[in-house]
Image (spheres, rainbow, N blue to C red):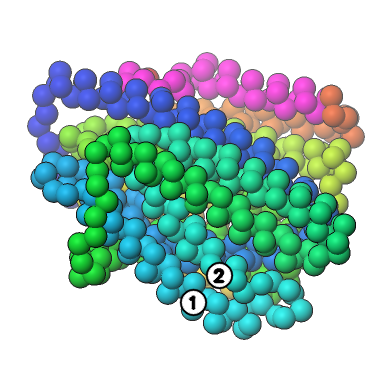
Amino acid sequence: MVVTPNAVDPEGAHDDMRRDFGDFRRGVSAVLFGSGARTVARLTLIFFVVTYYGVESFGYLGEVAAIVELSAAFANLGLPKSLFGYLEQHRREGADQGALIGEACLATLLTGGLLAAGIWLLWPYIFPTAAGVPAYVAGAIVLIAVTEILLTVTRSARLMRWDMMAKGVVKPWGFLLLAALGYAGGVYALGWPPVQTLFVSYLLSLAITGIFAVAGFVMVLRDQHISLRYTSMSKVLQLIRRTFPTALLDTCSYGYRRLDIIMLGLVAGPAATGVYYLAQQLATVVEKVRHLFEPMASPIFAQASSDEHVGHYLRKLCLWIFSIQLGLALLFLLFTGPVMAVAGAGMVLLPALFAFVLAAEIMEGGTGLIELPLIFRRPVLASRNAIIAITVEILTIVPLTYLFQGVGAAAGFFCGMLTLSILRLRYAREVLGTRLLNSSYIWPILAAGAIAGAVLGVMHIVKWPGPVLLAIMISGSLGAYLLFLRAFGIDLKLKPAS
């Protein structure tokens, strides 16, 4: 059934769209800076931890991060997405936004505390004593969940600098700095256990990020003239029940990239998990492209005046995200191996494993923004799609991981994301009346194919390219891809008429 767009005033609608795209530009610019800073820190951290702490320590870090972040996603109760709509509803109705924010914080703290206690009790059954992974890391669930709620409130005011600084600078660079200090002052100088030192650094970086988020949260409440209030525990429980479908959706969203790591750790051990986690961490650069748009898209979709506007935003933004992700994936797939060889990294990524992970990220990211209007309009349907996708992923990951280990886990992840993308596109077509896939998607694919052929031809001639030639090839490939897109009429500028 196609929903008929609501009637709107054309002139007012144009003003709204101009304002929205202005916010998109500012928001994307802020998040882009943070994403770039986070990417540099992430890649540096990967090579540092693998080189000095060891691949097994890196594998344990991946397993712990999978468990902790998956639990924190559920503890957030879907509020990082749904809170925008709730706050907008309170604003329109003149209701107390401070009470809602207080209820959201308490709901997250309560759920996160219960999950952390449960994981702490199960810790000896999850990690062997010989691994040396400290059980108090379970407390990271509360830190991550509460920090995300505080940053959500800052994003609801369309202020991206706090989120950008917390996630792009404070957390990744704090972890890198603390890990380096921990190794130099603890592991190397005093003989501290590498695994425990690494996880202390991880916890401290989360605590520092939380403190920074509190500062931004307090300033936004002050500037918005919102007084944080507590009403009653019954209100908190009502909010939990109300947001439970979105909580399932968010948990599944995190589970897509966590279940494969957990399963691989059970089957193949920390060394194999470390290699897979490396591929996944590199692929997050591609994944995060969607998140350049999502923080600003969430409040804009929540406040959109018609389904026609929502469809317009989705058609433009999904094509942009797909094009950018495909270009980045192309660079990673072509040049990660040669760059790691030049850098002297002691790890080798299997091309098939990396290709599966990158293809899955492109499909999930290119359709990811469809979930935002889905959450605001039909949260139960969004949860159903997520449950179907993660069920497919589990059913494929389990046998494929036993048969092919890391490549099998990546293939299972790919199957889950393919299913999810199909379900999202069906929703956009049947409910919003928006057909997202069109001939415009052919041009980025043709551009990527042409560049891949040229690069592979050069690499066939030059077997071992040096750092200078690699830098020229990477920058030349990126420039050629952007020129191809421009020639094919795909304008990546954020403006209503683009």
Q: Residue at x 50, y 64 (%)?
A: 141
Residue 217 lies, in percent from the top left, at 38, 44
Image position of 287 (left or right of 454): left
Main secondary structure found in the magenta portion: helix
Q: Secondary structure at mark 2?
A: helix
| Residue at numbered disc 1 | 117
| Image quarter (top left, top right, bottom left or bottom right) of the C terminus | top left
Three-letter amino acid code at disc 2? Ala
One can see residue 288 in this view: no
Q: Nearer the viewer, residue 176 or 264?
A: 176
Instruction: Give the vertical position of 71 relative to 225 (above or below).
Output: below
Q: Are marks 2 and 1 in contact (CB under 8 Å)?
A: yes
Q: Nearer the viewer, residue 134 or 289?
A: 134
Crowdedness of circle 1 by 10 Å Cα count: few (<14), some, many (20+)? some
Q: Residue at x 74, y 62 (%)?
A: 197
Q: CA distance from mark 2 to mark 1?
A: 8 Å
Q: Nearer the viewer, residue 230 or 339?
A: 230
Q: Residue at x 49, y 34 (%)?
A: 31
Question: Magenta stretch containing residue 484, yes or no?
Answer: yes
Q: Residue at x 27, y 51 (%)?
A: 228
Residue 232 lies, in percent from the top left, at 20, 66
Instruction: Please tell me which of labels 2 and 1 falls first in the chain.
Output: 1
Three-letter amino acid code at disc 1? Ala
One can see residue 398 in this view: yes
Residue 155 lies, in percent from the top left, at 37, 40
Image position of 50 (left or right of 394): right
Q: Secondary structure at mark 1?
A: helix
Residue range (magenta): 469-497
Q: Which mark is residue 138?
A: 2
Crowdedness of circle 2 by 10 Å Cα count: few (<14), some, many (20+)? many
